[in-house]
Structures are given as structure tokens and as C-alpha cells.
Image (cartoon, coloured by chain):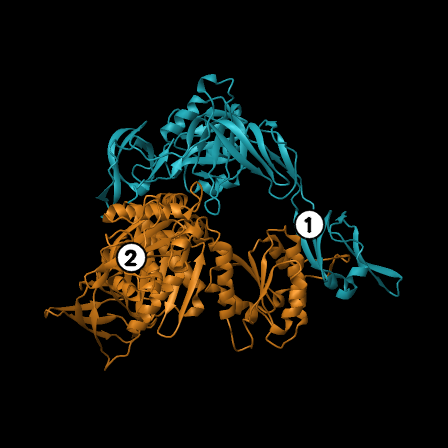
Chain colours: A orange, B cyan
């Protein structure tokens, strides 16, 4: 391959917080296929403390699996591919192994500038640990004289002083607005920053009234590293998050990604700059959204974070939810959610003590793989609540619609049963309508966005042929609280071979209709009064050709929110019934 | 083509070796230890005074002083120490007949003044950093701490409650599978490091604390006892995981062989951003243990035929065995139907001997 040519044989390395996966993609006949994928433990933490150890191990496993030499005797990547077939033309890498960027948002108005900044940060790799809004303080910054002699401090400012953010995002004021309140904010940040030990002081990123920039810089710049970007809220009715997001992304790469031990070498091996896994996954979702004119919701259950992407033909948004991991974060998830809430998703055959122990042990040894079916049920219970937390934090993004839901990450990589995965998504996602659910069974789909940067054709072909498996198509009607007694809907499914299945769907039920992968059936649905399918009807009937999946066609008439009533034991019995109904 | 050297994570259970440990103050302070100095576990090697709190307030707001006037009204400057109720700033009122003042809310140090904003660190209680490890100072980190080198036995745990303790090892269960009840505990256990097999009841856990045991090391802990353990003053370390899991035989046997010896328990742990494990260290002097030879630095364990491994998944969680003579990693189907690289392990521990197939990712080296 000449340097200018499109690489044909490519290694994809995905270095997560827990696992490092390496995949080999190459041309087989006239199309690109996934030749093999290997998985090993990520080695950024002691005793390894070098991300390359895991990458090289995974590549070595791939050599054993495929019989193809990829590394030379010195352990260096053989590139470009030799005529003998050794090596590859290129390697691309993504990573989510970096710790998140901790931030504090300080602004003038909770509902305006601070809210705009928080919305902008939700799509970055920064966590918002603290927020301060001037208009929330009791009238002014701190209280005035207490006990007639001494003044009181500001609790929220002291909260900021006690925290250790990497970045303080300072916002406030529309462009051309008043400057004085921002100078007060600048004094607060400068005083707190200078009280911190050198080396531990945060960077200040100013995204407020641009007219105040010079004076704010003057007050802060002598003490703390100061950067300024365009106002996140230049006018009251216009948000401008891009500049803030781009700068935070740059800071994240400088301070968190590039400091991953061994990152420089991985960068040297990579044909393109290494991007965050979620950024790459967003590209995949965007591709599917544009190609099929779909609204795509993509979830990535990482070892330490939950990634969430919403893409349609026009726009892609993403959110990274730290501390909602399926491995490192499981103990915190248990503490945050509470056992009673998690227990709802456990059938009565699994004791809560066993489940608790399993969640905690998984957080201690995140790389281990559950091998018993009940352990996967326990993992999926936590995944449901992680998704619910994700929905809660992204409420404003209207996640309750989709044509396609993509699932990637721990529950799938650990070999969850397809029907169990489908039910998990149905239980947790607050989506009504008709949509498909697909799973990333190879664990490499999020990284295909990086592959697209060097060979878009290969990425598209691998995604559709090897990457995704359709679990099924689901119909989730929205049930009115005033629903009349009787069935929710009548469905008639006519298969290509002429077979016909008639189903009367009762409220509260889950119906599984066999319709395999690639099979298409004519589906006719007559919803009862008070039942909304979320699609236009013709003379009260919905007709469409629908494709099946590994699990089949599922009609979920349980209603939203799910009917969890009665005692915990009754709820768990209901969970057991739902698992049985979809064959999980 | 490179040789695939399969790797596994490791847990160290070492009868005799040399370790180095960083001892760090929570905030910057003064280090009294000197390089080359010999240390007893309870020796204080550094001291710091972490602030009890950090007061941040606007002088403009509390006193009505204009920002431009703050410098000339201040009686104290950045870096100055102040006593409780000492006047920091004053402003004349009523034509200069009276002064409006702001007094220090407590003894502390003024650490920052910017514009009208001031930050005061209120003095807290001094914190002494103890050596914990009986050994020698090999390096001093000015204002931060020191690196101590020590020789002896080391056992790594999998979870720790965060505190530190020092005492004499006391085996309080007879087997790896026994759960410690409250009854056997008595005043004799004061200041001792309790070693129990499979677990401990909540009553026993609370009794151990009330008896002022120095620490507790146990195979496992029921999940609901995690929060209880975290609130205790004594450190708690578990060696296997949460649930009901017998202590691994090599760990139990090593502790049994060192029963009655002094040991240090460090319950601190961190999963990400510089991972570290909780541990028990039993100092062993060369002179007293001449038969052990010279203590050597710990080198990472390697995957090889016959290497000792511990199983990290049910139903064999915590069982110890050895890798086969011919290390053949094959794809095997699990109970759930998933196929994954697996290896045949010969389990050899107090619970018996048997051959089992275990997924490679669910093993770790131990030794």
C-alpha cells in the first residue's frame, strides 16, 4: 500500500477503562469483514501503568487467533502490510480510559448562564461537581453581620473552595451586558484559586460576556491559568455551546488523555489522532441516522461511564455520564440507587444478599466475566437503573423517541441473552412507538467511527455485516390512563410464506411473536381507543412491513411508566413473569 | 510473530520479601524523618495541620467597604496568622468615633485576598503521620512524606475500609470456612489484629470495635456490613470479596504461621487513578529469621505451568489451585452458553482437590 492509498487491512484498538479490545479488519473477496477481535485487561493502572501492555497483548492474541504476524521481534507493529501478508496497513485507536475532567460551573444566573453552561458540559467529558449561581445566594454573596459582630461566609463559595476541580467554567452576562457582577465572580475565583496549593490549582475557562473578558483576565490571570472562549449565552434567546465544548474537549485531551501512561506510543502507532470512544460511537450513530433517515439512540455501558448518543439526519448530541459504570462504578451505583430499587429487577429466585455481593465484587474486579445466567440477570438489573439515571439526567433532550436503539458495552460483551438484553432496554428506556433494538455483539462497534476516518467503506461494511445484531422490533403503545377495559390492540402478522398470526394484546402484557433475523412480515395493528402507537393510522389501522430479529417481534403493552405497584416481592414476581414472557 | 505471553492480574501473598511504601501527609507539612533512619511502626515521621475549614467571604459584603478601600482598611495581609476574634479589617463609622470591624472566626491563616474577597484557613488539629511499616527511610519527600523500605511478609486484600492499624496477629477462627461470632471475642483481643476465615457477624464486628481491636482481616463480608465497616475506627480488610467466601488457604496458612507476631494493617485502597490495594505487612528482621536469607524486592508473578492461581468467579470464588503443566487455553462454553478462552485448573486447597475449567479472565495469580 502506498502512503496515499486507502488502508485495506486495519487494526482497531479500543482501550476502555476496564478492557482493551483489538479487532482486525481486512478485505475478504470484494468486501471488508471483521477477521477477529480479542479482549484483554486495560493496563493503565499499577502494576502495569502502560496502556501499550494491554494493546500489545491483545494484538498478540489476535496473532494467535488468526495466524497472522502483526508484531515484529521487537514488539513493534508491522506496517504497512507486507506482500507476505504480515502486518497491517494502519492502526486506529479510541480510548475511554482517561479519568473525567472535574469541573465547577460558576455564573450569574442559575436558570440562564449556569443552565446553558451545564447543558453544554453534558456533551463533553467533563463532570460538573459544583455549581454556583449568584442569584441563588441569599440576596448577596454570603450573609452580612451575624450575631451583631462578624459577617457570615458563603456556603456555596466555601463548597467550591473545598473541592478540587480541574477546570472552573465561569459564565454570566449576555454580550454587552453589565460587567461589575462578573468582576466580583472573578475575585471569588481568584481568591479561592490562590488559596489552593500550586500544582493543584484549576484552570479557569471564561465563557461569559465578552466585553468583560479583559478585566476578568486581569483579575484571574495572575493567579490561575486563564482561557476565554465565546459567550455560551451571548443573547438571552440564543445559546452558543460549541466554543465552550471545543475548548473543554481540548483541555480534556491535554490534561487527561495525553497523560495516560503509554499514550504517546499508541499515538505514534495510530494513523489518526486518538479520539474518545464516545466521539467515535457518535460517528457510527450519525452514519446510521443519515443512511436510513432514522432517529438513533445509542448507549454504551462502559466500565466507568455510561455514554449516550442521540442522532438524527440533522443533528447528533452525546452525553457522557461518569460514575455510572458497569464495573468500577457499580458500588457507587448501588449506594446511589438503593437496594430496594435495584431489587425490583431481580426475580425472586435470586437473593438480594447474593446480588449485592455480586455487584460489589464486580466493582472490585471489574475485568471478570460472569458465567452463570443469574449473574447476568443481576448485572442487567444494574444496567436498567444506570439507563434510568441516564434518562433522568438527559430529560431535556427528549430521549423518548427512537427508530433504532443501539446497545453496546458490558451487558452485551459479557454475553447477555438476546431476549434478556431486549427486555432490559424495554424496561429502562422511556420510549413509546415502533422501533428496533440492535446490539454490538463484537464489542467493537463504538470504535468503527475511528475506522471510518481512514476507510469509510470498511467501517460501513463491517458495521452492517459483522458489528450489529438486530435483537428485534418492538411495538410499545402509549396507554391512556382512561383506557377502556378489554384488549389494548389486535395484531395480525403475515409472514412471507403466507403464515398468519393473530394476537389479542391485553393491557399489562408482553407478547413475543416469532420473526427471525432478516425475515419481513406484513403487520396490521388495530389499536383500541386510548392507545397511541406513535405513528399515523389509516382508518384506525396501522399497516407496515416489519423486520424481525434474533428475539422476534415484541409488543409491549405494559404501559409507561412500568406498573411497579404492591410489595417488593410482588414487583419481583412481576419481573420474573416478564422474563418468562420474552423467554429471557 | 510475537510470542503471546498470557497475563493475569496478581494478589501478593509473600512470606518474606522487601517492599517500599510511600507515606504521605494529607496536606503539606513538616517531615521529621531523615534518610537512613530506622523506624518503628508507631514513630511519627511527619506532621501537618490540615485546616479545620476554609472560610471564604466578601469584605465588601460583611463590612460595607468598597473594593478600592480594602487594602488600606486591612490590618492583616496574606500569609499572616490570626487568633480567634482578632480584628482583620476595620472601618471608621459615626465620623470616626467608632470602628466597624471584622474579627477572625477562629485561629487560622489568611491564605488569599483578591479584590474584596478573603480566604482564611482555620487551624485544625495536628495530624501525625506514623511510619506504620517497621523499616528504614530510603527517601524523604520534603513537606510531603517519606519512602520507607521494610522486609517481612505481605498479604494484599481486595477491599479495605480505609484506616490504618498496628498490633499483634491473633487467629480467631480455626478454619478458612468458619464465620467469627461475637462469643469468642474477649478483652484479650484488645489491640490485636483479628484474623477470621470466611466472615464475621455484625454483632462480632461491633464487639471487635468496642474491644478496641487494632484491625480485622477476614475472607469476606456480607454486603450490608460494608457500610458498618466503613464507619468503624479500626481498619477492616477482606481478602476474597463480598458475600460468604472462605479465606484463601495460602493467606490463612501464612497468617497462622505468623500468629502472635506484630503486623501493620493499611486499609487504604484506590481503584482508578493510581490503583492501590489494602494490605497487611508483618515485619521480619533478618537477624531473627536468618534461615529466610536475604529479603528480595518483589518481582511480578508470571503465568507458567504450575503457577498458583485463585478463582474469581462463582461457584469456585476464592478457591486456589494451579495452572496445568501444559498451558492450553481453549474456547469453552459456559453455563450461560457463552464461549470464552478458558483453562483447566487443578484446585488444591483446604476445601479439597478437583479439576475445573475456568474462564481465563476469572483467574488471578496468587503468591
Task: Give the foreground label among 2 and 1.
Answer: 1
Chain holding disc 1:
B
Q: Position of residue B217 (x, y in %)?
A: 46, 32
Residue at the (40%, 27%) spot, across then down:
B252
The reply to whether discs 2 and 1 touch (Cβ–Cβ < 8 Å) is no
The part of the image, by quadrant, that contains residue B134 is top right
Q: Please determine whether, in this image, residue B85 is positioned above or below residue A225.
A: above
Chain holding disc 2:
A
Q: Position of residue A141 (x, y in %)?
A: 67, 63
Side of A303 relative to A138 (left or right):
left
Residue at the (18%, 64%) spot, across then down:
A515
Count of numbered badges drawn on the protein: 2
Q: Position of residue A96 (x, y in %)?
A: 41, 55
Q: Which residue is mark 2?
A: A421
Please tell me how crowded label 1 is: few (under 14), some (14-19), or many (20+) other residues with Cα within 10 Å: many
The part of the image, by quadrant, that contains residue A30 is bottom left
Residue at the bottom extreme?
Answer: A539
Side of B4 relative to B53 (left or right):
left
Residue at the (79%, 50%) spot, across then down:
B86
Question: Of residues B159 and B286, which is closer to you in this image?
Answer: B286
Q: Position of residue B96 (x, y in %)?
A: 88, 63
Whole-number angstrom distance, CA of label 2 to CA of label 1: 52 Å
Q: Please determine whether, in this image, residue A397 is positioned above or below residue B275.
A: below
Question: Of residues A318 and A528, which is closer to you in this image?
Answer: A318
Residue A378 visible from this viewpoint:
yes
Q: Please determine whether, in this image, residue A365 is positioned above or below residue A235.
A: above
Q: Secondary structure at mark 2?
A: helix
Q: Which residue is mark 1?
A: B121
Amino acid at each position: 500500500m502506498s502512503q496515499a492509498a486507502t488502508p485495506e487491512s486495519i487494526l482497531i484498538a479500543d482501550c476502555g477503562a476496564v478492557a482493551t479490545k483489538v479487532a482486525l479488519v481486512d478485505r475478504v473477496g470484494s468486501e471488508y469483514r471483521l477477521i477477529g477481535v480479542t479482549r484483554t485487561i486495560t493496563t493503565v493502572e499499577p502494576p502495569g501503568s502502560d496502556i501499550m501492555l494491554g494493546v500489545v497483548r491483545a494484538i498478540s492474541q489476535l496473532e494467535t487467533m488468526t495466524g497472522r504476524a502483526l508484531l515484529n521481534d521487537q514488539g513493534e507493529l508491522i506496517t504497512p502490510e507486507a506482500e507476505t501478508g504480515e502486518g497491517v496497513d494502519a492502526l486506529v485507536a479510541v480510548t475511554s480510559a482517561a479519568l473525567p475532567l472535574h469541573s465547577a460551573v460558576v455564573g450569574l444566573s442559575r436558570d440562564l448562564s449556569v443552565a446553558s453552561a451545564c447543558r453544554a458540559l453534558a456533551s463533553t467529558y467533563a463532570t460538573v461537581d459544583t455549581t454556583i449561581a449568584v442569584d441563588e445566594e441569599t440576596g448577596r454573596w454570603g450573609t452580612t453581620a451575624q450575631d451583631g459582630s462578624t459577617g457570615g461566609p458563603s456556603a456555596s463559595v466555601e463548597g467550591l473552595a473545598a473541592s478540587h476541580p480541574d477546570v472552573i467554567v465561569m459564565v454570566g452576562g449576555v454580550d454587552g451586558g453589565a460587567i461589575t457582577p462578573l468582576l466580583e465572580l472573578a475575585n471569588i475565583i481568584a481568591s479561592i484559586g490562590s488559596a489552593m496549593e500550586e500544582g493543584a490549582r484549576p484552570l479557569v475557562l471564561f465563557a461569559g460576556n465578552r466585553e468583560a473578558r479583559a478585566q476578568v483576565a486581569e483579575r484571574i490571570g495572575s493567579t490561575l491559568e486563564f482561557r476565554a472562549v465565546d459567550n455560551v449565552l451571548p443573547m438571552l434567546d440564543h445559546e452558543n455551546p460549541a466554543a465552550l465544548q471545543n475548548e473543554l474537549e481540548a483541555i480534556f485531551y491535554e490534561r487527561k488523555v495525553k497523560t495516560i501512561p503509554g499514550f504517546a506510543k499508541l499515538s505514534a502507532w495510530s494513523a489518526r489522532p486518538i479520539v474518545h470512544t464516545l466521539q467515535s460511537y457518535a460517528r457510527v450513530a450519525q452514519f446510521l441516522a443519515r443512511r436510513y433517515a432514522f432517529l438513533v439512540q445509542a448507549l454504551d455501558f462502559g466500565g466507568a461511564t455510561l455514554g449516550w448518543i442521540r442522532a438524527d439526519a440533522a443533528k447528533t448530541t452525546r452525553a457522557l455520564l461518569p460514575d455510572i459504570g458497569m464495573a468500577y462504578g457499580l458500588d457507587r451505583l448501588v449506594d446511589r440507587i438503593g437496594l430496594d430499587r435495584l431489587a425490583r429487577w431481580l426475580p425472586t429466585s435470586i437473593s438480594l444478599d447474593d446480588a449485592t455481593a455480586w455487584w460489589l465484587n464486580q466493582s472490585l474486579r471489574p475485568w471478570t466475566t460472569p458465567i452463570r445466567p443469574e449473574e447476568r440477570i443481576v448485572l442487567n438489573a444494574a444496567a436498567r437503573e444506570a439507563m434510568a439515571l441516564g434518562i433522568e439526567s438527559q430529560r431535556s433532550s427528549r430521549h423518548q423517541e427512537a427508530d433504532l436503539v443501539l446497545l453496546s458495552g458490558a451487558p452485551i460483551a459479557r454475553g447477555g441473552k438476546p431476549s434478556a438484553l431486549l427486555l432490559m432496554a424495554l424496561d429502562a428506556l422511556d420510549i413509546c412507538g415502533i422501533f428496533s433494538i440492535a446490539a454490538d455483539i463484537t464489542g467493537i462497534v463504538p470504535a468503527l467511527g475511528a475506522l471510518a476516518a481512514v476507510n469509510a467503506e470498511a467501517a460501513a461494511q463491517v458495521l452492517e455485516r459483522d458489528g450489529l445484531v438486530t435483537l428485534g422490533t418492538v411495538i410499545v403503545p402509549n396507554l391512556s390512563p382512561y383506557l377502556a377495559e378489554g384488549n389494548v390492540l389486535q395484531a395480525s402478522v403475515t409472514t412471507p410464506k403466507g403464515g398468519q398470526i393473530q394476537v389479542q394484546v391485553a393491557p399489562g402484557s408482553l407478547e413475543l411473536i416469532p420473526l427471525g433475523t432478516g425475515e419481513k412480515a406484513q403487520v396490521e395493528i388495530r389499536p383500541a381507543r386510548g392507545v397511541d402507537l406513535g405513528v399515523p393510522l389509516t382508518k384506525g389501522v396501522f399497516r407496515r412491513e416489519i423486520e424481525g430479529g434474533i428475539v422476534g417481534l415484541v409488543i409491549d403493552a405494559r404501559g409507561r411508566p412500568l406498573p411497579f405497584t404492591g410489595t417488593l416481592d410482588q414487583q419481583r414476581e412481576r419481573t420474573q413473569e416478564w422474563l418468562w414472557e420474552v423467554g429471557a | 510473530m510475537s510470542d503471546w505471553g498470557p497475563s493475569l492480574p496478581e494478589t501478593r501473598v509473600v512470606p518474606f520479601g522487601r517492599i517500599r511504601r510511600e507515606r504521605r501527609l494529607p496536606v503539606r507539612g513538616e517531615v521529621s524523618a531523615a534518610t537512613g533512619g530506622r523506624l518503628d511502626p508507631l514513630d511519627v515521621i511527619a506532621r501537618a495541620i490540615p485546616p479545620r475549614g476554609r472560610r471564604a467571604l466578601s469584605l465588601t459584603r460583611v463590612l460595607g467597604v468598597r473594593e478600592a478601600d480594602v487594602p488600606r482598611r486591612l490590618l492583616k495581609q496574606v500569609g499572616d496568622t490570626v487568633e480567634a476574634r482578632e480584628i482583620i479589617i476595620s472601618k471608621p463609622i459615626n465620623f470616626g468615633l467608632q470602628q466597624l470591624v471584622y474579627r477572625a472566626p477562629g485561629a487560622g491563616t489568611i491564605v488569599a485576598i483578591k479584590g474584596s474577597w478573603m480566604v482564611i484557613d482555620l487551624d485544625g488539629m495536628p495530624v501525625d503521620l506514623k511510619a506504620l511499616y517497621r523499616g528504614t527511610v530510603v527517601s524523604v519527600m520534603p513537606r510531603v512524606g517519606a519512602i520507607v523500605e521494610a522486609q517481612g511478609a505481605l498479604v494484599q486484600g481486595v477491599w479495605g475500609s480505609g484506616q490504618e492499624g498496628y498490633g499483634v496477629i491473633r487467629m480467631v477462627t480455626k478454619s478458612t470456612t468458619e464465620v467469627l461470632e461475637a462469643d469468642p471475642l474477649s478483652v484479650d483481643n484488645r489491640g490485636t489484629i483479628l484474623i477470621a476465615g470466611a466472615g464475621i457477624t455484625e454483632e462480632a464486628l461491633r464487639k471487635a470495635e468496642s474491644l478496641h481491636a487494632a484491625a480485622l482481616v477476614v475472607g469476606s463480608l456480607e454486603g450490608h456490613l460494608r457500610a458498618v465497616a466503613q464507619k468503624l475506627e479500626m481498619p477492616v480488610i477482606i481478602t476474597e470479596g463480598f458475600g460468604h467466601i472462605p479465606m484463601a488457604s495460602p493467606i490463612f496458612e501464612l497468617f497462622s504461621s505468623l500468629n502472635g507476631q506484630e503486623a501493620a494493617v493499611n486499609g487504604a485502597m484506590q481503584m482508578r487513578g493510581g490503583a492501590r490495594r489494602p494490605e497487611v505487612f508483618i515485619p521480619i528482621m533478618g537477624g531473627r529469621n536468618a534461615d529466610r536469607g536475604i529479603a528480595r524486592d518483589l518481582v511480578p508473578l508470571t503465568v507458567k505451568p504450575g503457577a498458583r492461581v485463585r478463582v474469581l468467579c462463582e461457584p469456585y470464588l476464592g478457591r486456589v489451585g494451579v495452572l496445568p503443566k501444559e498451558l492450553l487455553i481453549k474456547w469453552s462454553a459456559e453455563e450461560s452458553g457463552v464461549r470464552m478462552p478458558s483453562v483447566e485448573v487443578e484446585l488444591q486447597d483446604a476445601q479439597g482437590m478437583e479439576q475445573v475449567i475456568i474462564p481465563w479472565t476469572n483467574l488471578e495469580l496468587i503468591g
